C-alpha cells in the first residue's frame, strides 16, 4: 500500500528477488477495503505508506495472517541503512507464481489474477521493446499508479529492462502536476488514459506547455475516441498509441503502432499473441460482426485466486475469454464495442455504448459522457446518456434535445439516447474507469 515513490520499486523488486508473491493495492484504501485485501491475500508482510497507517491500525486486529508491517516515510529508511544487504536471489522458477494483479471488477471487491515470474518478461519482449520501442534514453512518467498492472509495466518494469528511467511522484496526476513534471524532468514518454488526455487537452494554459520532449504517449484502460485523439495531437504534436490489455494477460496485447494508427480502433494484435472475436459458443464470427474477444498469449494468468468456477469460465486451455465485446475489420484492426454487460439490444439490433459516446463527444458542449441502458415503461432496453458539460455550458431541456438530435444525425436513429442526464462529473474507480454500475442505479 505505497504511492508512486522510490520505495515502491524497492519493495516490489525486493519481494520478487526474495521469492515472495507481491500484491500491490491503492494506498488510499478505506478500512473495509484494506481488511478485504489483507484477508483475501493472507499477506504476512505489509509495506504501507505512513499516511495510510491509521487505516491499517483500525483493521489489523481483524487480519490474523498479517505478522509484519513496514512503513514508508517512517522507520523504513532507517531500517534499510542498518540492514545487511544480501546479494543472493531466491531460486525461483520461471513458472512460479510471482505477482497478483487485480481486475477492476464490475461488482463486489476485485479478484486477483495470479501471474508467473516469466509473464512480465514475455510482455516486455513482445510488446514493450519491439512495439513501443523502449530504449535506454527514455524517461517515462505515468498518470495511472504503479499499483495497477498497466503502469507497473509501462512506468517501472519496461523502462528498467531497457536501461531507461522513470519519474515517480506521489500526487495525483492532475493537468497542473503533469505540466510541472514535463517542465522539470523533460520526459520522453507519457503513460496515460483517455480521461487524462481529455483533461490535459482542455486545461487552462495547455497551449503554453512545451511538449517537445515527449516522443510518444501510450494510452489504455478505455477506448480513445477519434475526436479526442485529434484534439490531443493538434495541441501537442505527440503520437498516441492506444491499446488494450488486462489483468488476466498482464499487459497490452492489441495496439496501434508508430506509423500505423487507425483512428477509432485499438490497432492490431501484438506479435506473440492471438486474438479472435467469437460468438457465445466460441466460434469465430465473420469480420465486422460483434462478438466476445478471446486472447491467447504466454503472459496469461494461471487463475483467479480462490475463484475456481470463474477461472474455468475465463481461462479455457490456452485462451482467455474476456468480458469485452469487439469487432474486427477486414484489415485485422480491432474495435472496442463495450463490456458484455454494457451492450444493449434496441429493437432487436445491437447497440454499442462506445459508439454513441464517441458521437456525443463530438458536440462542442460535451466534456465527458457515459451511455448505459435502462428499461422503458414497456420493459424494453433503451440508451440513457450521462453527460458532463464543458465550463461555461449550461444544462437544459433544450440542450438535451439538441444532443439527441446530434446523435440521430451522426448514427442510425435508434442509437440516439432516449434520455439525457446532466452531471457535474462521471463517477470513476481508482483506476479512472467510469463506474457504469453506479450510473445504472
Image (cartoon, rainbow, N blue to C red):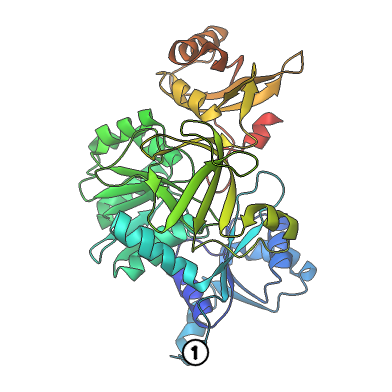
Q: Total number of numbered labels?
A: 1
For residue 437, what is the image quadrant?
top right
Q: For residue 422, say whether it is visible.
A: no
Q: Position of residue 408 (x, y in %)?
A: 49, 11
Above or below, 104 relative to 114: above
Task: Name which residue lies at 74% across and 64% down.
Answer: 59
Could you say where residue 90 lies in the image, as x and y percent from the top left? 52, 87
Q: Residue furthest left?
A: 212
Q: Quadrant of the C terminus?
A: top right
Q: Along the line of sight, which residue is nearer the eye, 299 or 56?
A: 299
Which residue in the protein does label 1 denote?
83
At x 28%, y 48%, the residue is 216
Relative to the observer, which residue lies in front, 193 or 413? 413
Mark 1: secondary structure: loop
Q: Position of residue 192 (x, y in %)?
A: 40, 47
Residue drawn at (68%, 65%), measured in percent from left and top? 56
| Left or right: where 238 falls relative to 58 | left
Amino acid at each position: 500500500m505505497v504511492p508512486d515513490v522510490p520505495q515502491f520499486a524497492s519493495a516490489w523488486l525486493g519481494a520478487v528477488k526474495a521469492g515472495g508473491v507481491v500484491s500491490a493495492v491503492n494506498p488510499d484504501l478505506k478500512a473495509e477495503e484494506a481488511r478485504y485485501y489483507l484477508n483475501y491475500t493472507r499477506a504476512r508482510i505489509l509495506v504501507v505508506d505512513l499516511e495510510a497507517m491509521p487505516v491499517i491500525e483500525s483493521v489489523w486486529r481483524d487480519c490474523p495472517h498479517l505478522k509484519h508491517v513496514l512503513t514508508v516515510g517512517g522507520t523504513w529508511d532507517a531500517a534499510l541503512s542498518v540492514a545487511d544487504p544480501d546479494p543472493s536471489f531466491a531460486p525461483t522458477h520461471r513458472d512460479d507464481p510471482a505477482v497478483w494483479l487485480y481486475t477492476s471488477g464490475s461488482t463486489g471487491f476485485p479478484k486477483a489474477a495470479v501471474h508467473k515470474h516469466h509473464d512480465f518478461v514475455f510482455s516486455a519482449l513482445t510488446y514493450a521493446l519491439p512495439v513501443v520501442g523502449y530504449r535506454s534514453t527514455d524517461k517515462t512518467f505515468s498518470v495511472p499508479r504503479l499499483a495497477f498492472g498497466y503502469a507497473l509495466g509501462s512506468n517501472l518494469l519496461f523502462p528498467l529492462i531497457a536501461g531507461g528511467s522513470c519519474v515517480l511522484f506521489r500526487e495525483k496526476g492532475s493537468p497542473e502536476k503533469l505540466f510541472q513534471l514535463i517542465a522539470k524532468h523533460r520526459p520522453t514518454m507519457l503513460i496515460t488514459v483517455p480521461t487524462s488526455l481529455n483533461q490535459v487537452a482542455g486545461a487552462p494554459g495547455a497551449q503554453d506547455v512545451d511538449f517537445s520532449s515527449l516522443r510518444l504517449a501510450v494510452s489504455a484502460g478505455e477506448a480513445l475516441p477519434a475526436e479526442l485523439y485529434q484534439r490531443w495531437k493538434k495541441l501537442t504534436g505527440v503520437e498516441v498509441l492506444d491499446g488494450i490489455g488486462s489483468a488476466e494477460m498482464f499487459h497490452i496485447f492489441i495496439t496501434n503502432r508508430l506509423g500505423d494508427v487507425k483512428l477509432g480502433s485499438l490497432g492490431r494484435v501484438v506479435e506473440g499473441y492471438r486474438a479472435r472475436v467469437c460468438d457465445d459458443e466460441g466460434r469465430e464470427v465473420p469480420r465486422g460482426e460483434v462478438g466476445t474477444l478471446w486472447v491467447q498469449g504466454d503472459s496469461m494468468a494461471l487463475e483467479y485466486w480462490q475463484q475456481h468456477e470463474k477461472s474455468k469460465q475465463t481461462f479455457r486451455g490456452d485462451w482467455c475469454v474476456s468480458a469485452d465485446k469487439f469487432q474486427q475489420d477486414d484489415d485485422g484492426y480491432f474495435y472496442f464495442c463495450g463490456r458484455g454487460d454494457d451492450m444493449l439490444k434496441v429493437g432487436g439490433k445491437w447497440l454499442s455504448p462506445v459508439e454513441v459516446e464517441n458521437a456525443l463527444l463530438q458536440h462542442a458542449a460535451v466534456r465527458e459522457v457515459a451511455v448505459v441502458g435502462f428499461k422503458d415503461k414497456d420493459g424494453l432496453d433503451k440508451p440513457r446518456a450521462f453527460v458532463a458539460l464543458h465550463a461555461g455550458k449550461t444544462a437544459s431541456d433544450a440542450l438535451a434535445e439538441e444532443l439527441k438530435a446530434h446523435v440521430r444525425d451522426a448514427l442510425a436513429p435508434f442509437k440516439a439516447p432516449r434520455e439525457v442526464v446532466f452531471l457535474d462529473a462521471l463517477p470513476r474507480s481508482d483506476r479512472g474507469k467510469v463506474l457504469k454500475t453506479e450510473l445504472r442505479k
